[in-house]
Amino acid sequence: MHRTEIIDADAPTIESDPAPGISEAAIVSRVRSFVHENFLYMMPDFELADDDRLLEKGVVDSMGIAEMISFIEAEFGVFATEAEISEANFGSLRAIARFVAAKQPYAVG
């Protein structure tokens, strides 16, 4: 005796693709919150633009960059190699967002 399975063609399918990555705007927002909570908490009126240079403005120092990298690894699952730790990738909120989005396989603009 043979068993025959009937497959319902209208049944929902389970997608195996991961969800799209987070947008650059959302990354900027999360990183900005982290910066305000950890580095600018004593300066609530400090205005930080997306392109402001974090080191140049005195927002973070080298230890702050190390903390930021740890946050990015934990928050976004993105890991930076030594060669990638640079002003170009970690110098501003926008640079960090571009770096994180580029490292995510399904990042959205």
Image (tube, rainbow, N blue to C red):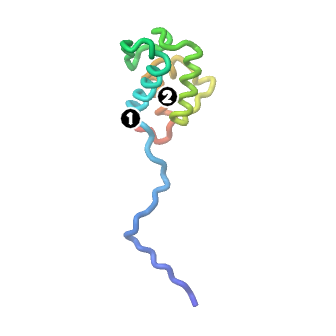
Q: Which residue is mark 2?
A: 99
The one nearer the camera, 40 or 78, is: 40
> Where is 74 relative to 106, above or below?
above
Residue 50 in which image quadrant: top left
x, y (%) of residue 96? 48, 25
Q: Position of residue 89 (x, y in %)?
A: 51, 22
The three-letter amino acid code for the residue at tag 1 is Gly
Reading the image, the residue beneath label 1 is 109
Q: Quadrant of the C terminus?
A: top left
Mark 2 vs mark 1, CA separation in Å: 12 Å
86 vs 42, left or right, is right
User: In the rendered structure, which disc, 2 or 1, sits on the residue that comes first in sequence?
Assistant: 2
**What residue is shown at x 48% (from left), y 13% (from top)?**
59
Q: Residues within 10 Å of mark 1 (few under 14, many from 20)?
A: few
Residue 16 in the image: above or below residue 107: below
Q: Residues within 10 Å of mark 2 (few under 14, many from 20)?
A: some
Is 28 above or below relative to 65? below
SS category of the residue bearing label 2? helix
Q: Please, is residue 21 above or below residue 61 in the view?
A: below
Q: Quadrant of the N terminus?
A: bottom right
Most extreme residue toward the right is: 82
Percent coordinates x, y for residue 51 in the rendering: 40, 17
Residue occupying the point 45% across, 47% down: 19
Among the 4 quarters of the image, the one containing residue 36: top left
Which of the pair 75/7 is nearer the observer? 75
Q: Disc 2 marks which amino acid? A: Phe
Secondary structure at numbered mark 1: loop
